[in-house]
Amino acid sequence: MRTSILEFPIKHIDENLVFANDQTVWAYYRIEGFGYDFLDFDDKIKPFQRQLGFLANNGHDLHFIIDPTPMNISGIMSQTKQEMNRLDYPLKQNGLHFMEQVESQLNRQRTINESGEYVHYLGVQLDPAQNQIQSLNMGNSAIYQLKNFLQGLSSPVYHAVGLDPYDIPIEEIRAYQEQAESLIGNMINGFSSMVKPATASEIIYLAEKTYSVSTSNQDVAYREDFESGYSVEGTDAKAQSHEAVRPKEKAFVDVQNANIEEVDPKTLRTSKIINNEIEELYTQYVICSNMEDISMHPGFEWLYHLQSRMPFPVSVSIRANYQSNRSIRKKLSNARLEFKDQRQEAAKGHENVDLSVNESEKGAVQMENYFKQTGQPAYSCSFVFKVSAKDKKTLSTRVGQLTDELSRFGLSVLPPYGEQLNLMMETIPGSKSFMNDYQMHVSPNILAGMMFGATTNIGDNRGFYIGYTKQFQKPVFIKPDLAAKAYENLNNVFDSISVLVAGMTGKGKSFLMNLFVYLAALTGSQGLIIDPKGDRKGWINGLPYIPKESISVWEMGRDERDAGSLDPFRTSTNLEEGKDICMDILSHLVNVGIDDDAYTLLSEAIETVSKQDDPCIGAVITYLQNLYDHEKDKMTAVRFASVEKLKSTLETLRRNQLAKLLFGEVGQEYKVLKTSVPIQVLMVQNLNLPGSAAKTLRPQHKISEAIMISLTAFTKQYMFNQDRMRHKFILQDEASAIERSAIGSELMDFIVRMGRYYNTTLIKGSQNASDHGKEVANMGMKFSFGLRKTEEAQEMLNYFNLPQTEENIDTLKNLGRGDALFQDIFGRSAVIHVNPVFKDLLDAFDSSTATEEERQRELRETS
């Protein structure tokens, strides 16, 4: 049997509008979704209440589509490459070539993997008058139909020469577009998610997948340039011109390029020729025949659980026709009268009514009372599920698994006899319900409770690839500066473009940060890496696709010209900041507090030196030396003792090899940061940062911390002095050393808060959750690798704004190497595995000391 016996439902597509052959007009939207996995009981109530409010006040017929769509990797990569081409940067060609290699590899993996991400679309039938017609009696309905008919006759397509009745006036399309645009705000609130109009290529893709012969839809591509109509113009009797769109008669023929047969009354077989081979796919559509009266929430999220538990893709189409409260109560009242008539007829024949009649009557009474008490509308729904497989045996097994899974939530499904083609057509956007036998009247609570929009998807679906989700191996893409773009309807929860990375040593924290800056540089960003441990020494020889000329590795302390380079007067953005940082560093080094006389002396020295032509710490020491040599008679014994202590301590520290970086001298030549290269790495030789458990700080510890504070001031200067329109990154490894200082914490907080304005992403890395300070609330993306202690896991969950449940704590404590709990800018959280794609990158960024032979041996022993 061929599908040509059924009319294809779509007449024309204009952006997200679907003009159907039955004269209805639908607008389709993509619901990006919200995270649900890590929420506790109270948090799960919130999205339910929002959806309930939306559905109770909606007033439109709806079409819910849950589509297991393989991620459009080529589309994402194409968009990324287009953005790269618009930029002018030295690594452009290398970056484009790298992206092509990644795209090829990911597409190769996609052909093997049957699963994909579940994409949520919501169709809304436009023009509320049509919904009103459905709920009126036959007499009023006829009046409305006549009115619409007369209005239709006044349309320019009936009066303008050159236009046909089948044409769609441009003014009508614009009116529908305005109506469709006005609905987005309510959807965003209702589904706690970014909502954007579906594209024409997405709608065509959804329709064409109906005719696919692959379980992963590899034979269906996005038709980016698809056009279903062309512009025409007509002139009326008053010589006024009218523009319209004329649908192409055969526009959708190619979309239906497949042979579909009913191999039995409950199964379809789709076939087409691909690469000179006949490919076949068996499909069964099942419809919900009964739904138990269960609407407890949380607990009834059957739609969400279906996505996360089924090991094969399941497509879901739910058509929900709006019924006003008055209309549904009238229908239920009529149903009660019918049951009463059946009972009376049975009594006349001295028979008892069937038990099912009693149960149905009881249910109708309960529903009527419910709608009478709540005043809510109802939805007349059909729930259709599509399952496919390459053979009938596998198909039967999968349908059985789906049936069992749905039964756990009180849903019974069956494949209606001889109705497979009708159900197939019903799932296509712009179509209608074909089967009234299985229509169910449900309250908004039932639809809200299924958790449409709750998703396991994560990331930006644009930018560069960083890995995949652990649950379904879905690719994860991020665009570091997306939150700064302020795109309309983006609906991101976090506006910051800074990134938090935490986790204990050996879990993959440094690897992710390295991969992040590498990919950012290849896609057009430039940045600065503060590397206190010297893990990136080898980068001086270049990286795959990034030649050594594009990387500057400055290992401070190796060259005599490095002396004084980190003097706070030279690393700060302005003189006042230089004075503050100098005061903070020196008071820390000599161990004086604000109540000490020495603190006042130090402040006076710094203030005096700041007015000189070449202020530096060396000049501060010289000032103190002059006081000691020439001003003794003018000072009290206590003050002189303070001068002596300051001078002696600073002179001693001045001789320290590491401190020479901090202690600048008047008139000396010193090296400055190279801002022209894509990647600038700053390392400090012999840096000795204290551990978090250290109770007493040795001089070397204090000097190392002071250097980190000065380096942070350096990063602020870097942020200020670069092109604001070009995205920048600053990788601050071992951030805990900076957080311990008040001025260091303040500097870090400033970079985080102002990063969005200056288009600068701070990648802040630290081992423990407790190392991150008050600016956590201002961070955007967050990555947490494995944490050892329960207290650390609890604090990290607090940073993620996730409940501190035992399950969530265990998740953080049991993350494997390379696995991280990731939270995107939309507030969605999922466990991902960081994947560099290529072994060359794995080797380049791996900071472990294990040899390849040791890794292979460990793999064999643990597998």
Image (cartoon, grey):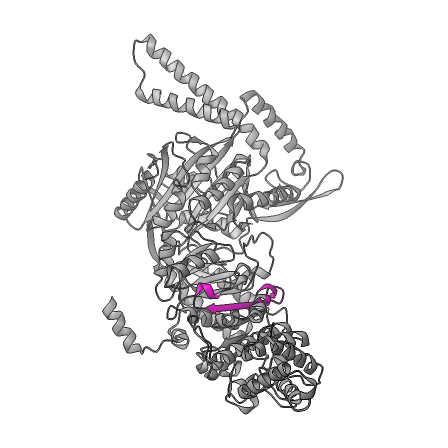
Residue lying at the far left of the rendered structure: 861
Q: Quadrant of the C terminus?
A: bottom left
The image shows residue 539, relative to residue 509, as above or below, that is: below
Quarter-wise, where is residue 719 in the image? Answer: bottom right
In the displayed structure image, the side of residue 309 where residue 39 appears, left or right: right
Q: Nearer the viewer, residue 408 or 212?
A: 408
Say whether residue 852 is magenta: no
Where does residue 459 sit, x and y in percent of width and height? Answer: 47, 58
Report the span colored magenta. Answer: 750-771
The image shows residue 499, relative to residue 350, as above or below, that is: below
Q: Residue at x 32, y 16 (%)?
A: 353
In the displayed structure image, the side of residue 368 where residue 60 appears, left or right: right
Where does residue 807 sit, x and y in percent of width and height? Answer: 36, 52
Where does residue 607 sit, x and y in percent of width and height? Answer: 68, 79
Say whether residue 760 is magenta: yes
Decide if residue 251 is in sight here: no
Residue lying at the far front of the rendered structure: 637
Q: Quadrant of the N terminus?
A: top left
Count of residue discs:
0
Q: Residue at x 68, y 40 (%)?
A: 161
